[in-house]
Image: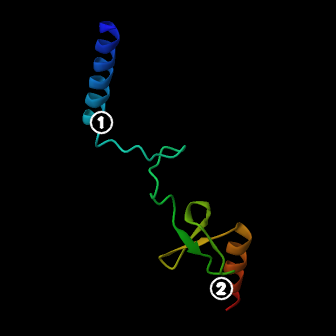
């Protein structure tokens, strides 16, 4: 009986010490390893078709010193054609 009490007290001491040492570690992580509430990517608007999409998926074009992002290569190409017609 005495052995069970000693094991119980040791376990509770271990849990208390563990929670005290790791109190500043965030436990609200997702499967991807990012904390919840963290912004994954920003949404931007295609200048041609006006649809919103994640910036990391965009097709980049640097025109007149301005960085433009398009939702697809087709939108980028049609934007270039429209600019050349003017």
**What colouring does the structure picture have?**
rainbow
Q: From the image, which quarter does the C terminus lie in?
A: bottom right
| SS under mark 2 | helix
Residue at the image point whose x is 47% and y is 76% from the top: 65
**Looking at the image, do the residues carrying marks 1 and 2 touch, with CB atoms under 8 Å apart?**
no
The location of residue 71, given as percent across then percent down, is 66, 69
Residue at the image point whose x is 65% and y is 85% from the top: 83
Q: Callout 2: 10 Å neighbours few (<14), some, many (20+)?
A: few
The location of residue 13, given as percent across then percent down, is 26, 24
Q: Relative to 42, is 86 above or below?
A: below
| SS under mark 1 | loop
Q: Name the residue under label 2.
A: 83
Q: In the visual, does 49 lie left or right of 5?
A: right
Q: From the image, which quarter does the N terminus lie in?
A: top left
Q: Mark 1 points at which residue?
A: 22
Q: How many marks?
A: 2
The location of residue 8, given as percent across then percent down, is 33, 18
Residue at the image point whose x is 73% and y is 78% from the top: 78
Residue at the image point whose x is 51% and y is 66% from the top: 42
Q: In the visual, does 75 lie left or right of 26?
A: right
Q: In which quarter of the image is residue 77?
A: bottom right
């Amino acid at each position: 009986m005495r052995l069970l009490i000693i094991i119980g007290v040791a376990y509770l001491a271990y849990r208390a010490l563990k929670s005290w040492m790791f109190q500043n570690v965030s436990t609200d992580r997702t499967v991807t390893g990012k904390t919840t509430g963290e912004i994954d990517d920003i949404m931007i608007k295609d200048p041609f078709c006006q649809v919103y999409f994640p910036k990391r998926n965009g097709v980049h074009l640097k025109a007149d010193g301005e960085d433009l992002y398009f939702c697809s290569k087709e939108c980028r190409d049609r934007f270039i054609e429209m600019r050349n017609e003017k």
